[in-house]
Amino acid sequence: GLGRNIGGVQFKDDETIENFMTLLKAQGLKSPAMLLWDMKRMVETLGAGNLNEDEIVNKEDKARKAGYSCYADQQACTTYRTKFPGSMFKKRAGTDDFAFTGFFTSRNKWEGTLDNSPAKNALEEIQTILERGQLLIDKRAPASSSVFADLHQVAIWLIVSAHRHASSFFNSMIPLVKLFVSCKYDEDEAWEQVQEFAIRIFEEIYKKRNKSDQMTDGEKLIGCYEATLLAEEYSKANWIHHSNTLSTLTAMALKQSATDHAKLKNVIAKIEDERLGLKRINVRLDSQEGIVKKVEKFINKQGAGKGAGNKNE
């Protein structure tokens, strides 16, 4: 089987993961999967981070009446039923296509103003979601418990990663739209390209996280883990510079008119130039790091030699 290290906890294979999650239920944790996060769930939870105490109590009551252990359990189960986060996308009327919704519908709405910026507010809200999620993990799977310590470690790693990936994804949207504008797209056209890019990102995440129509808790953990690894790859490449971004843009270009095709080719060329520049920087940094290590090794060797000489004296 495939061994997996999830947040520092080593699992021999997928069967071990399934047994791990099953055992947690046997130990009294009704829904261990409710403590699992990835970027999709973090983005989907936007709106819940601003609930006041009375609204939270109301949500908890409705969730229990619907058969869930709590509101977090309901949120976790719901997130596997949809491909796109409802806080960000809605279905176009009369079609199977999806489009941005709410303050994601235009660059101006997303950026907002100095006094009221949905982009800034979203970053603050997912920080609140992170903090509340960590508190729930601490409560339901305390690190001090020998039974739940591994789940606590896994869940904390997942939610911290989910927060980091959602933050970097949101922060990549304006640089990406500026890139399109610099290649002769008007503002509305450029934002439509960002929307298309975001749709493809969540389609990729969906393929990683959704293992079957009736997912077991073990499959949910594996799905969150694989979706997290994918988001980590994109995040490290600032989303724009990931190799899949170029593939996505190339696929988009093939569906567009000759004029838009030419503009998108310019975008791809710019990204390739930026990636090449970053690669050169990384090569120089690696080279400098190698020199530093050689110097440190030489200094340590010299120090060891002097120590031996003093001892002989």
Image (spheres, grey):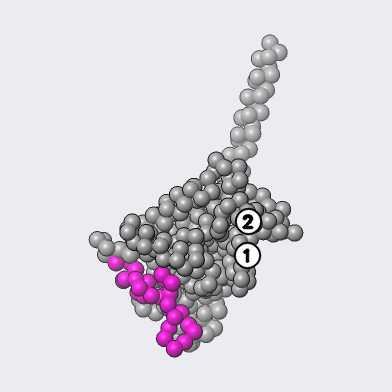
Indicate the secondary structure of the residue bearing disc 2: helix
Q: Is residue 2 left or right of residue 42?
A: right
Please give the residue where the numbered disc 1 appears in the rendered image: 216
Instruction: Check the image and report above or below for 229 versus 297.
Output: below
**Which residue matches tag 2?**
21
Rendered image: mark on residue 59: none
Q: CA distance from mark 2 to mark 1?
A: 9 Å
- Amino acid type at circle 1 is Thr
In front of the other: 241 or 103: 103
Earlier-in-chain disc, 2 versus 1:
2
Tell me which residue sits at (60%, 35%) in the image: 295
Residue 147 shows in the view: yes
Q: Is residue 12 left or right of residue 275?
A: right
Residue at the spot 34% in from the left edge and 71% down from the top edge: 103
Residue 27 position within the rendered picture, expressed as x and y whole percent measured from the top left:
61, 50
| Image quadrant where one finds the N terminus | bottom right
- The magenta stretch is 86-112
| Residue, far left | 115
Q: Position of residue 191 (x, y in %)?
A: 39, 75
What's the residue type where badge 2 is placed?
Answer: Met
